[in-house]
Image: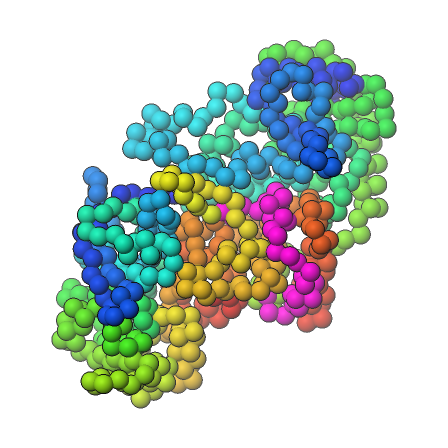
Amino acid sequence: MRLKKLNSEELIELLEIFFAEYDLIAPFKVEQGRLNRVLFRKIRQNNEIPSIYLKEMPETTPKNFILPRDERLDFERFNSEREENENSLARAKTRLFFGVRSCDLAAIELFDDVFLDEDYLDPFYESRREKNIFIGYSNQILPPNNFQKELEIGYFDHQLAPAFIYEDLEARGREHYWLKIKAGYQFSKDVEAHLDNLETGEIGNLEKLLNDWEDKFTGETDFEIKNKLPFPEKEVFNQVDWQEPTASCLGCGVCTYYCPTCFCFDFFWDGSTKNRAWDSCMFSLFTEHASGHNPREEQHQRWRQRLLHKFSYHPQNYNDKPGCVGCGRCIYKCPVNLDIRNVINAVDKTLVKGGQASEER
Amino acid sequence: MKRDDYLPEEAEIIEVIQETGSNLNIKTFHLKLIGDDPVFDFKPGQFLMLTVHGVGEAPFGLASSPSNRDRIVISVKETGKVTAALHELTVGDKVGLRGPYGNSFPVEEHKSQEIIFISGGIGLAPLRSAIDYVLDPDNRGDYGRVQMLQAFRSPEDMLYDYDQPRWEDAENIDIKYTIDKPCEDWEHCVGFPHKLIEDEIDCIIEGAKYYVCGPPIMIKSVINELLEIGIKPKDIITTLEMRMSCGLGKCGKCNIGHRYVCKDGPVFSYQELLDMPEEF
C-alpha cells in the first residue's frame, strides 16, 4: 500500500494527468434553475477540472455509465461475425471514475453479480464494464440519510477501487487530501511518475483520521436493522402492514431512478431498433398484463416489492447480499419524505411481534 | 456461461389459423426459423419471446409438440399492442423469436401416471404442448389414462377444432367440454370448470397429475376445488403468466417472491406456489 499527501493544486495536477491518460468521469456541481445538483460527468476539457466537486455525495453514480438510462441494443455488434465486430462498442481509452463513494462501488459489485452471472452474461453490460478504474472518495461528512454501515459496507475502502482518496475538509495544505493506492496496483507510467513526486504520508496518521471519522459517523446514525437478512419472504409479505408506512407514496419512481442498485429494465422500440431503458417497480404498468390483470394493483404492493426485492429476494438469490447499499438517496430524493428506514422498522417490529425474529444481527 | 444478447432471430409465418368464431380474437400462428439452423428445440411448457418489428415483444407459451421440430406453434389472443399487431400479419411476414425460455411440464417425472388436463380458454395453448407430447405414439405407452376438461366462453371460442377429433380418437382418453352459459345445439357441459370437476372428471387421488391452465381466477378456483376433493398440492401443476421483458430473470418484472416466472417457471406445482407469496 502506498500513501500520498496532496494539497488542492496537486490534486488538480493529478487529475490533469488522469485526464490525459484516461476518459475521466467525476462529479460536478451543476446549476439547474434554482437547484444545485452534483452529477457524474465526463470531463471534456482541461479547464473543467477545477470544477470537479467532491465534498457532497453526488446525486448520480457510475451506474449511469455502466447500465445507462437508455441504450440501443446494437444489432451490428452482435451479428454472426461477432468476433470481428467485437470492437464497435469497445473504447480506446480506459475510463477512470474519480470520487466514487464506497456504497456506490458496492452497487457496481451488485450489478456484476446480476449481469455477469455464471449462467447468464449480458454482453452489453459486459462491454461497458470493461476497462474501468474506480477511485473511491470519502470525507468526514456522512451523506444525508446514509445507512450503509447497517448493511456492512465500510465507508473508507472497497475492493473494486484500487485507490481511494480522503479529503480532510478541516485541514489545509498537504494534509488536505490523502491518496491511498493498494499494494501491487500500478497506474500508467505518466501517472506513476507524477505520484513519485508527491509526499508520502504516514499510514498511522491516516488510520487515526479515519477512525475519528468513523466514530463521528457512528454517533450520527441510530438506525438499525434488527432482523437478519434475507427477511423471511412469506411472513414479511403477508404479515407486515404495508399500507400504513407507505400511504403517502405518489408512485413517482424517483427512488428507483436515483437508486444505485435498481437494475430493472424494459425494452422499447425505436423503429426497428431495440433499446433498453430503466424501468421502475413503483409504476403500475411494471406488472400490468395485456389483459388488464395486475398482480400489484396498489401502490403499497409496489412498495412491498421494492423493499422485499432489496432485503429478501435479492439476498436469497445472491448469497445473502442485500440489494441495497444504504446510500440514502431514495430518502433524500423522495418528494413526500418517505423513508425506507421507517418501512424496514415496520418489518422488524412485525417480525418481533410475531415471535419470528430471527437471531439478532 | 450462457450469453444472450436479447436480440431475436428472424422467423417467417408459414400458416395462420383463425381459431375463434365471431369475435375473431384468437389466431394460431405456425412459424419457421429462417437461417442456417431452423431447428427450434424446446420442452413442453416452455415459452418464447416474439417480436413484432417496430411494435414490441411479448412472451407466448409454445403450443406445439416438441416432437415436431420444424414448426413453432403459438396461439395468440388479441389483447394488447403486440398481439393486435401480430393479428394483422399473415403468411410470409417476418417476426423475431427468442427462446425457448423457462422450465417445462414435468412430463418425464409423470410417466406411468394418469394425466388430467383442465383448461380455461386460451390456457389450452400451453397445455397443447404437453397433450401432444403425452399422446404422441412414441410416448403414449408411457402414460396412463388421459382426461381433459376444456372450458370456453362459448362454442365460438373453442380452440383447435382440427385437433379435437384426433385427441378424441386417441387411446384411453376422455374429453369433456364446457361453456359458460347454455346455448342452442350444445350437447356438452355448461358452467365454470371448477363446478364441474367433481361430476365430470374421474378424480383419482393417488397416481394422477392435474395440469391446470387458464386465466388467474380460473386457476385459483380450480385449484381450490381440487384441494377440496383431496388432491395433493404436489400433484397439481400449473403454468403462470406474467408481464416480462427479458425472459432470463434479469429485467425484474415477473418475480413472485424470490423466484422468476421466466426462469424458475412458468410451470409450478401448487406445492411450490404454496411456499411463494400470493402475487400473481
Please report the residue visible at 52 percent of the width from the left and 61 percent of the height from the top: B257
Q: Magenta span has A247?
A: yes
Whole-percent x, y for residue A131 in the image:
52, 26
Quadrant, the N terminus of chain A: top right
- For the residue pair A281 and A6, the one nearer the viewer reads as A281
Q: Write the start and end of the magenta stretch as one range.
A: A237-265
Instruction: Using the image, determine if residue B254 lies above or below residue A293.
Output: above
Instruction: Using the image, determine if residue A197 lies above or below residue A149.
Output: above
Q: Number of marks in the image? A: 0
Quadrant of residue A17 within the rendered picture: top right
Please report the residue visible at 48 percent of the width from the left and 54 percent of the height from the top: B253
Residue B217 shows in the view? yes
- For the residue pair B134 and A92, the one nearer the viewer reads as A92
Q: Magenta span has B106?
A: no
Please report the residue visible at 70 percent of the width from the left and 35 percent of the height from the top: A33
Whole-percent x, y for residue B143 in the image:
22, 72
- For the residue pair A38 and B147, the one nearer the viewer reads as A38
In the rendered structure, the answer to whether residue B105 lies left or right of residue A71 reads left
Quadrant of residue B133 within the rendered picture: bottom left
Whole-percent x, y for residue B189 in the image:
27, 85
Please report the residue visible at 65 percent of the width from the left and 65 percent of the height from the top: A242
Instruction: Using the image, determine if residue A360 lies above or below residue A261.
Output: below
Whole-percent x, y for residue A112 in the image:
52, 40
Residue B101 shows in the view? no
